[in-house]
Amino acid sequence: MLGYGWGWSFVVLGGLIALGGVLVLFFLAPYPQYVGFGPSPIEPVSEESTDGEDISAAGGAGKDRRDAVGIFKALAIPGVVIFALCLFFANLVAYTFLYWLPFYLSQTAIGGEYMSAASAGYLSVLFDVGGIVGGILAGFVSDQLNARATTAAVFMYSAIPSLFLFHAYGSTSKVTNIGLMMISGLFVNGPYALITTAVSADLGTHKSLKGDSRALATVTAIIDGTGSLGACIRTICYRIHIEKRMESSVCNACTLCICCCRVVVK
């Protein structure tokens, strides 16, 4: 879109988002049960409520009228605050590195040659491609081991040497640059994808809720919102690095954030 003017990138992406919203509105079933998977989404309450009241009599036969879980109760769920903070730092690292990449690639000689801003932008997409593979791999490993926190921690620890290797040897050749960039994206974006999906779903249906799944949206919003705050702070950090041309400090800052991720995920 740069060839037609930078404004068209917003127009085209906005149109794609609108199209996706229309498809979701008309074709996405709200529950898997509506398309034949699993039992009915609304089932009669078979157990007595914890306070001894008859739920079916108070709220209507066959329907669970319990109130949705509030924000403070959702924050009290074990692991919500910890993983929210972890996503904060993971988002900070992912977005800082992603937005710094085009500038770094255009200002650094790759294999002895400088590339244009457009070519640097295209090449930086491979960081996200590695992130796609990392998200799938992190989800598969965590399902096999049934260890979300351990999987996230291993990926974040592995991201530290990959970032330093990319900074040290990424300028050797274009092939080396692409390989190290995709590996960095794999380890950086893997925990981010894991926390925003499987971890949020697990915490939203935590055993402390005693079968009440109404906290799922609240927990997901808390975790994603905290992660978005990290993405906002990324803008400030990125601006400082660009203005002072501290390319090497980007990897150091990202490493510090990764260490903070590991501290909160014990």
Image: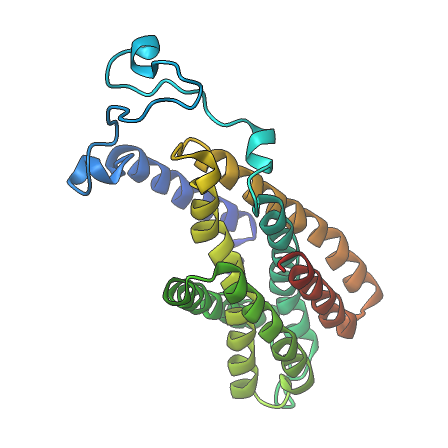
How many marks do you count on the picture?
Answer: 0
State which quadrant residue 101 falls in: bottom right
Asked which colour scheme the image uses, the reply is rainbow
Q: Nearer the viewer, residue 164 or 127?
A: 164
Q: Is residue 233 left or right of residue 6?
A: right
Q: Is residue 214 left or right of residue 39?
A: right
Q: Nearer the viewer, residue 252 or 95?
A: 252
Residue 207: percent from the left, percent from the top?
A: 44, 41
Please determine whether, in this image, residue 135 is positioned above or below residue 235: below
Which residue is situated farthest in the left direction here? 36
Which residue is situated farthest in the front direction here? 52
Q: Quadrant of the C terminus?
A: bottom right
Residue 1 makes an appearance in the image: no
State which quadrant residue 44 falls in: top left
Residue 29: percent from the left, percent from the top?
A: 25, 36
Residue 231: percent from the left, percent from the top?
A: 64, 50
Q: Residue at x 52, y 72 (%)?
A: 123
Q: Is residue 237 left or right of residue 88?
A: right
Which residue is situated farthest in the right direction here? 244
Q: Residue at x 42, y 34 (%)?
A: 210
Please determine whether, in this image, residue 151 is positioned above or below residue 68: below
Q: Residue at x 61, y 90 (%)?
A: 111
Residue 225: percent from the left, percent from the top?
A: 59, 41
Residue 199 makes an appearance in the image: yes
Q: Residue at x 34, y 16 (%)?
A: 55
